[in-house]
Amino acid sequence: EERTLAMIKPDGVSGNYTEEIKTIVVEAGFNIVKEMLTQLDKETASAFYEEHSSRSFFPHLVTYMTSGPVLVMVLEKRNAVSDWRDLIGPTDAEKAKISHPHSIRALCGKNSQKNCVHGSDSTSSAEREIKFFFKDVVSG
Ligand code: ATP
């Protein structure tokens, strides 16, 4: 079993996609190990997306991620990291609607920024991100 960090971003929560997304998660065979509804502040959102801090879109990303509550989840299954990335689809939701019409981002994302959900991109980022939000969860 492997764990990944999934997040329903502010547009997903405010658009009332939470229940639909959680149904997809469970039907895809993931176990929701932990979940937390939380409002990110600027400092937390900046730290979470630290790797993008030099990008031009970073200030917009922080504004977007702090615009409302997010639902953070730890998902568990075999190949959780890559299976969740496959399920959410490409970063740009506009492209996802064409190339991956059944993906979660096609369902509830808008564009390359407002893309509704997050998923760790590797097992090492999953470990970092799970610790970031759930310091008491022992991974593996
Ligand atoms: P995430 O890390 O949220 O799962 P990702 O790994 O698919 O998304 P990244 O390249 O890591 O994509 O970008 C992180 C987030 O930054 C994206 O999910 C999106 O919200 C925002 N973002 C990425 N590229 C752009 C862009 N060109 N313009 C605006 N926002 C962007």
Image (spheres, rainbow, N blue to C red):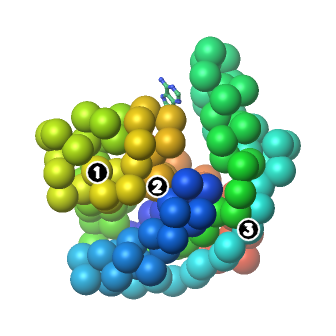
The residue singled out by tag 3 in the image is 38
Residue type pointed to by label 3? Thr
The answer to whether 139 appears left or right of 41 in the picture is left
Disc 2, SS: strand
The residue drawn where x is 67% and y is 29% is 60
Crowding around mark 2 (Cα neighbors within 10 Å: few <14, some 14 to 19, many 20+) is: many
Q: Secondary structure at mark 1?
A: helix
Q: Earlier in the sequence, mark 1 or mark 2?
A: 1
The quadrant the N terminus occupies is bottom left
State whether label 2 is within 8 Å of ligand 1.
yes
Q: What residue is rendered at 45% in x and 69% in y?
A: 17
Task: Identify residue type, mark 1.
Answer: Ala
Is residue 54 or residue 1 the one in the foreground?
Answer: 54
Mark 3 residue element: strand
* Image quadrant where residue 136 sits: bottom right
Can you identify the residue that label 2 sits on? 117
Which circle's residue, 2 or 3, is located before the other in the chain? 3
Q: CA distance from mark 2 to mark 3?
A: 14 Å
Question: Closer to us: mark 1 or mark 2?
Answer: 1
Whole-Å distance between the Cαs marked 1 and 2? 11 Å
Residue nearest the viewer, comparing 53 with 108: 108
Q: Which mark is residue 106?
A: 1
The answer to whether marks 3 and 1 mark residues whose Cβ atoms lie closer than 8 Å is no
Any part of residue 92 in sight: yes
- Kindly identify the residue that appears in the image at 66 percent across and 41 percent down: 64
The amino acid on which the numbered mark 2 sits, given as a three-letter code, is Val
Structural crowding at the residue carrying mark 3, measured as other residues with C-alpha within 10 Å and reported as few (<14), some (14–19) or many (≥20)? few
Label 1 crowd (10 A; few <14 / some 14-19 / many >=20): many
The answer to whether marks 1 and 2 mark residues whose Cβ atoms lie closer than 8 Å is: no
Distance Cα–Cα, label 3 vs label 1:
24 Å
Left or right: 4 as drawn, with respect to 127:
left
